[in-house]
Image (spheres, rainbow, N blue to C red):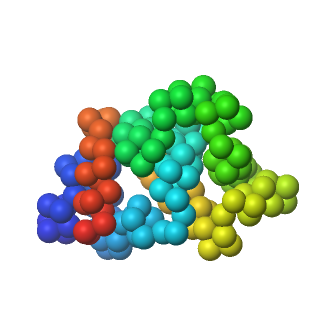
Amino acid sequence: MREALERVPPLNIFRMTAQADSAFVPWLRWAGVLLSRLELDPLLRELAILRVARLTPDAEYEWVQHVPIAQAVGATDDQVTALERDDVDADAFSPAERAVLQFTTEVVRDARASDKTLEAVREHVSPREVVELIMVIGNYMMVARVMATGGLEIDEPVGPDALRATRDA
């Protein structure tokens, strides 16, 4: 456990989840896969994570940590601002990004996307990437709930260093 904690940034989310010691290292590996080994475009992944953070009450921690990561993989200030306003239809987003954001919204709110929304996403990503997107959404819904329920104090954002740390976990 100590070795795993030494490999990741000293963030409250890692200290809290480490208390579930039998699940911590496997979860770090899983997070590393989601953040570095998917076919899903990293920008689409990060936009989905930010959307999960916005849709989850008290998930400011997730938002603060992932805005710099999203920007590092290509998110623009206009996109971040639009997500802050809950404007997933903003001109700042491409059709693929809008489809992913709508898909994320429906999966978070309704547990499944509508057939129409699923078809819209499938126009832009492969079947594998659809499954990867669902996995990202599910993981970050869980993380947001741990953060919100644990009342985590917000750390300064680590940014892309968090990607490197979980990749090596």
In which quadrant of the rendered view does residue 165 lie?
Answer: bottom left
Q: Is residue 58 above or below residue 31?
A: above
Residue placed at 61% from the left, 33% from the top? 92
Q: Looking at the image, can residue 141 be seen? A: no
Q: Residue 63's quadrant in the figure?
A: top left
Left or right: residue 133 versus residue 162 is: right
User: Which quadrant holds the C terminus?
Assistant: bottom left
- In the rendered structure, the answer to whether residue 141 lies left or right of residue 102 reads left
Question: From what the image shows, is residue 157 above or below residue 85?
Answer: below
In x, y percent, where is residue 7? 18, 62
Q: 94 left or right of 145?
A: right
Which residue is found at the position 67% from the left and 31% from the top?
Answer: 90
At 67% from the left and 36% from the top, the residue drawn is: 88
Rendered location of residue 106, percent (x, y): 72, 49
Provide residue 80's location: percent of width, then percent of height: 51, 33
Nearer to the camera, 64 or 111: 64
Q: Please tell me which residue is depicted at 80% across the width and 60% down the height of the picture.
A: 119
Where residue 161 appears, as percent x and y from the top left, is 25, 51
Q: Quadrant of the N terminus?
A: bottom left
Can the viewer see residue 40 in this picture? yes
Give the mark count: 0
91 to 116, vertically: above or below: above
| In the displayed structure image, the side of residue 103 where residue 147 appears, left or right | left
Answer with the quarter of the image where residue 86 lies.
top right
Nearer to me, 138 or 168: 168
Q: Is residue 63 above or below residue 160?
A: above
Residue closest to the eye, 17 or 79: 79
